[in-house]
Image: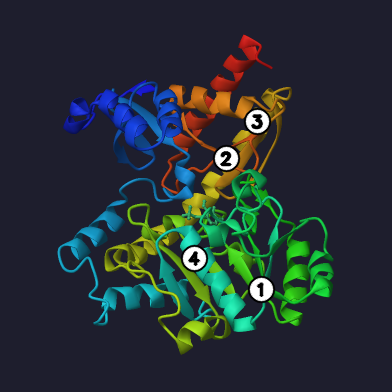
Amino acid sequence: MAASPQSPPKVATAQPGATFDRLRRHLSRGVALAAESMGNGAVEAFAAGASITLSDRRTALDFGSYSVALLGHRHPGVVEAVHRQLATMPTSTRALANPVTAEAAATLVDYFGGALPKVHFGLNGSDAVEAAVKLARLATGRDRVLAVRGGYHGTSLGALALTHHPGLRAGLRGCVSQTVHLDPFEPAAVMDEIARGPVAALVFEPVQGENGAFPLPTDVLHRWALDARAHGAFVIADEIQSGLRRCGERSVALAEGLPVDAVLTGGPLGGGVMPLSAVVCTEVLYRPLGADPLLHTSTFGGHPLSCAALPAALDAIEGLADHGRSLADGLANGLRGLHDLHPRMLSGFRGRGLLWSIGFTAPHMAGEVIVRLADAGLLVSPCLSDPRSVRLLPPLTTTHAELDQALGILDSALTDVARRGTF
Ligand SMILES: Cc1ncc(COP(=O)(O)O)c(C=O)c1O
């Protein structure tokens, strides 16, 4: 990582040793070990835009953060909106109407074009997944849900039923509800399952983030969605990672003209500052909640402090949409160049917009490269369902100079690994 001449004053007082000790003793030894190795003994201290400053004053570009930092860190418009709400009423009584929550819902419905007029707010992505599946099951009176091989939808018990990763489901078979995971290359998969019994919902990510940024074949998704709809099953697009222009569009599913009953959104919905997620859906899917609003509640659902971030976040995202497209072109070209330069090491690269992965020919290399990149000043994410790949999630606020810097770090790290002959 590079030395940062202008680190904020607080950075000097951070005590990394105490942090790792507390993490080990009170949280997870595994997390402590991984974070110690990623930061080379330093901890995170300060962030602005795509840049992170560590406790030892080195800086790194954040192309990871599991897609949450779509606007980079501490986007000024979002921070200001949250400060304003903090100074007025951050928490709702839940007995009185809160205008900030209502405005956030209306803004979100407009953002997705108005055809999905109902909103249910949560904090995490899995909150949205759980709520949508519960609504689909209640609205249809059916139990079975269809998801997709390689898909990731969270790890809470309801969401885990949809997540494909066998390691995450091990030991919990009896707790997770009935889900069938479809082969994404089988256009007749939905019809085959419907022939086996009634289906409540089809849930898919248009671009599977944790599965190495894999865009599902659009023609298959069209056929699946039409088949599901024709047989009374709801079609739910989980865009917690791919939406909000991460992959170029507000919603990939809506932009592709897929007939969906719900779009699930989260991650950067709170501007990378506040936790916020939402189910944005049709009246019909929402009907069970319309009939009984207490059917699915959570204390912080629609939290005004989180909701205050939403209009500012969507505003900022739209303001950066054109820049995002030109960054996406630069990133795709850069990865093509890297693939040409390191053909023995890289098996390929894939993705869409600002969500890409690079795959390695040797299975152990992704982890090694992630640590090496962090040391050289570039933070990236692993892929939970595709351990051979490394995921790149640059913020929309990234400058072209920062993108070039990141591609240069990648090239050097790959060259270095090749020179050491670990391949
Ligand atoms: C597509 C998708 N759905 C659901 C989730 C779960 O979100 P969370 O971890 O916020 O519960 C994630 C998390 O990365 C995701 O990528």
Find residue 120 and report its horizontal and vertical position in percent: 44, 74
Q: Amino acid at mark 1?
A: Asp
Find residue 248 and report its horizontal and vertical position in percent: 56, 56
Q: Amino acid at mark 3?
A: Gly
- The numbered dot on residue 128 is 4
Question: Is residue 279 toward the left or the right of residue 1 in the image?
Answer: right
Q: Residue furthest top?
A: 420
Question: Is residue 46 toward the left or the right of residue 180 in the image?
Answer: left
Residue at the spot of label 3: 337
Residue at the spot of label 2: 331
Of the residues under marks 4 and 1, which one precedes in the sequence?
4
Q: Nearer the viewer, residue 198 or 412?
A: 198
Find residue 292 and report its horizontal and vertical position in percent: 44, 86
Give how far apart the Cα atoms at labels 3 and 1 are.
Answer: 48 Å
Of the residues under marks 2 and 4, which one precedes in the sequence?
4
Q: How is the image coloured?
A: rainbow
Please tell me whether mark 4 sits on a helix, a strand or a loop. Answer: helix
Residue 332 visible to an observer of this rendering: no
